[in-house]
Amino acid sequence: MLRLSSPMGRGFGRLRAAMNADLSELPVAVPGFRFAGLSAGIKSNGKPDLGLIVADRTCAVAGVFTRNRVKAAPVKLAQRRVKPGRARAVLVNSGNANACTGAPGMEAAKESTAAIARALGVDASEVIPASTGVIGALLPASRIVDAADRAVASLAADGAADFAQSIMTTDQWRKVASLRITLGTGAVVTVLGLAKGAGMIHPDMATTLGFLVTDAGLSPSLLRTLLKQAVDATFNAISVDGDTSTNDTILAMASGHAGSVRAGSKDAKAVLAAMTDVLDALGKSIVRDGEGARHVARIEVSGLRTDRAARTIARTIATSPLVKTALHGKDANWGRILAAAGRAGVAFQPDLAEIRIGDEVIVRHGMPVGKEAEARAALILAGPEYTVQVRLGEGRGRAHYLTCDFGPDYVAVNANYRS
Amino acid sequence: MLRLSSPMGRGFGRLRAAMNADLSELPVAVPGFRFAGLSAGIKSNGKPDLGLIVADRTCAVAGVFTRNRVKAAPVKLAQRRVKPGRARAVLVNSGNANACTGAPGMEAAKESTAAIARALGVDASEVIPASTGVIGALLPASRIVDAADRAVASLAADGAADFAQSIMTTDQWRKVASLRITLGTGAVVTVLGLAKGAGMIHPDMATTLGFLVTDAGLSPSLLRTLLKQAVDATFNAISVDGDTSTNDTILAMASGHAGSVRAGSKDAKAVLAAMTDVLDALGKSIVRDGEGARHVARIEVSGLRTDRAARTIARTIATSPLVKTALHGKDANWGRILAAAGRAGVAFQPDLAEIRIGDEVIVRHGMPVGKEAEARAALILAGPEYTVQVRLGEGRGRAHYLTCDFGPDYVAVNANYRS
């Protein structure tokens, strides 16, 4: 029972209908955790900009961070604090990315987490920071210091929706997904996901933040392993424009209230599947939430020697401006798809290439099937969500990538963002 | 004395003035060569679509071809025929790329070059083909067979302009550049360059074709070396949208009428410099000739450990949609430049980063200089051509990349090309 707050998930009709749904039907309470979201005055428009997730007691934590060489201060601090695998709280601010801010930026990150730690009565090293917003401007730590007591006072078991609201930048909707599963022990486990990020890039760089909270009992090392696997299959296979942010962060916390899960067990697999499904739903919602994006395409590449080779090709197709503009134009332009595959730097047999849009084969043996097949494929491309399958040989390597189309609005938004 | 037919070269004011200049002032005759350009009926609109360059006798030839795994039939055939380093003629058609056409496509390429060879009275293996145009449609070889005698009959020493016209697809102007230099021996050598390609991608993939013709006497191996070096510094450092074509081809022919040049000599260096300047001018003209492109930016990256590392970063910046849309918006958005550098997969010290737009420093020690510097930089970004310097450390590795901005027209043209 995967529940969603916004246009994402498996069936697209249902999702768009749920676009502005409230979260009342969603299981957002996770035993062992409280949430808050409020205004601290970081955003000049007064909207919520401070989010807090607090575990009742120290719990397992794991993180996946941007691979960009240019890392914001909160990312560097979070990487350090996540290492021991134990934490109490996650502090998020929107409105300021605290990136490219040098030593003062690191001071500001430390000062704001210290203030929250004092208000909670825990050690500062147990508070993990994340920031999103304008880059190159110093985080006004004093605003967070001033709001710390208020933030802690407003923590509530049902505060996840407020939290989701507080981390938004130019998101058009809150991104919340959750799933309840029953383990072999009979225990019921909740996996709640909260994210922000818009397909296109308003605040300089489309920072993606994601938070997974579960009451499953996972050791720090198991949580780390599961998070990495779930992220690889979801958030690491999303492309909007190929650019990555200085602040991208995904954190997971596990309270253990629902009983412990052993590595390698069936229950661990079930938790991994739930984490993956929740992140997948959030990722789709992010891709879809973009100015000008009308279509979400799942690029599936198969037939290569290795999964890695397939992934390289899937990424090259998914980030090709020519492919993405063709998707915008509902044009079954197999030539661009094939040429993008061809420049990925991976060996394959062009003569064996087969391309399908949905169920419609438009290329077989490296040659076009014909205009009629392309016309039928164009009808599929008119839909909000579809699959593009690219088969490039006999190998068993396969991978997928989620992408969206490139419309004129994308350029307009990004050319004029700061002016 | 670099002469140009179109908006390219060093000084931009001069170039734009020359935009629609005729070629009468350009030294386009090269001893030992004749040229033709005519209509063979491959393009449905009746415009010229068949070009021919013929050497009076067998001469040195070298080629650089697309690295795309999906190669058009003419590319495969040309690669094979260029290998011995000797040839008599180059046959180019526009209007049809003869790509993704399987075995019949290879037959069509062979048949059309054989017809030209018969008309010239030479061996078919001495005729190098190149094609550009729609992909996935079989080349109508019979049209070329029918036009072969007419093509040969129209060859003329001053036919370069006709040739340049015949290879155009959606180019807005012919791309011709030439240079005359005097060698140490007193001999005068001409290097003539003819190219096609538009910054943005009308006929599916913006195929780039380039042809260098000189009367210098170069051995096949020296010609190959010089061509590779000249292309690496010019056409291989151009990005419009990161996509490469199935048909990209650059061919060079050297007749030797001006006397021979030895490898490693000063004269060889002078010829290399001339070839590089001519290709540089043609490359700029291609970048500039795009729907919606208003600015040409030279991205210069330095301070890395190796040239290769610098090139990787320069390419990542030059192909970033976020950077390119910012350039369109005349926005000195250093955050996007720095973030693009950071995701290139190359180690550098963000704290040492310095970014200049023209002479204006906007980032120093990894941090923004301030709003006033960015405002001054924005004035520079309003110009048609400028340099973006990115210094990322103390190393000696450096590289550059030529790119253009991404405007809404780019998306409009590419989304609607086939519909």
Image: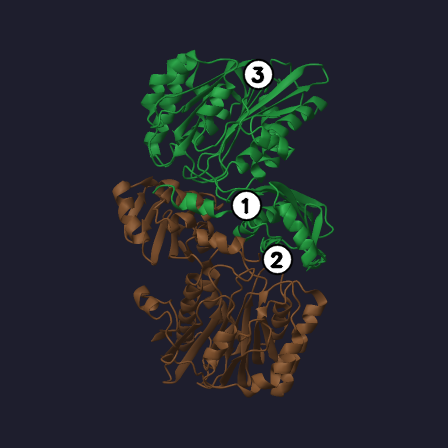
Chain colours: A brown, B green
Q: Chain of mark 3?
A: B
The amino acid on which the numbered mark 2 sits, given as a three-letter code, is Gly
Task: Identify the disc placed on residue B405.
Answer: 1
| SS at badge 1 | loop
Residue visible at 53% across and 53% down in the picture: A415
Residue visible at 57% across and 69% down in the picture: A95
* Marks 2 and 3 belong to one chain: yes
The amino acid on which the numbered mark 3 sits, given as a three-letter code, is Val
Name the image quarter holding the N terminus of chain B: top right
* Residue A93, image quadrant: bottom right
Q: Chain of mark 2?
A: B
Mark 2 or mark 3: name the one nearer the start of the chain: 3
Q: Position of residue B203 (x, y in %)?
A: 41, 37
Q: In the rendered image, is residue B8 in sight?
A: no
Residue visible at 59% across and 18% down in the picture: B27
Single out the mark in the foreground, 2 or 3.
2
Crowding near pointer 3: few (<14 within 10 Å), some, many (20+)? many
Question: CA–CA distance between discs 2 and 3?
Answer: 49 Å
- What residue is shown with label 2? B335
Q: Position of residue B221 (x, y in %)?
A: 59, 25
Q: Is residue A200 left or right of residue A299?
A: right
- What residue is shown with label 3? B30
* Residue B253, image quadrant: top right
Residue visible at 59% across and 59% down in the picture: A68
Mark 1 or mark 3: name the one nearer the start of the chain: 3
| SS at badge 3 | loop
Q: Position of residue B4 (x, y in %)?
A: 59, 26
Asked whether disc 1 touches disc 3, contact meaning CB atoms under 8 Å apart, the reply is: no
Crowding near pointer 2: few (<14 within 10 Å), some, many (20+)? many
Single out the mark in the foreground, 1 or 2.
1
Question: CA–CA distance between discs 1 and 2?
Answer: 17 Å
The amino acid on which the numbered mark 1 sits, given as a three-letter code, is Asp
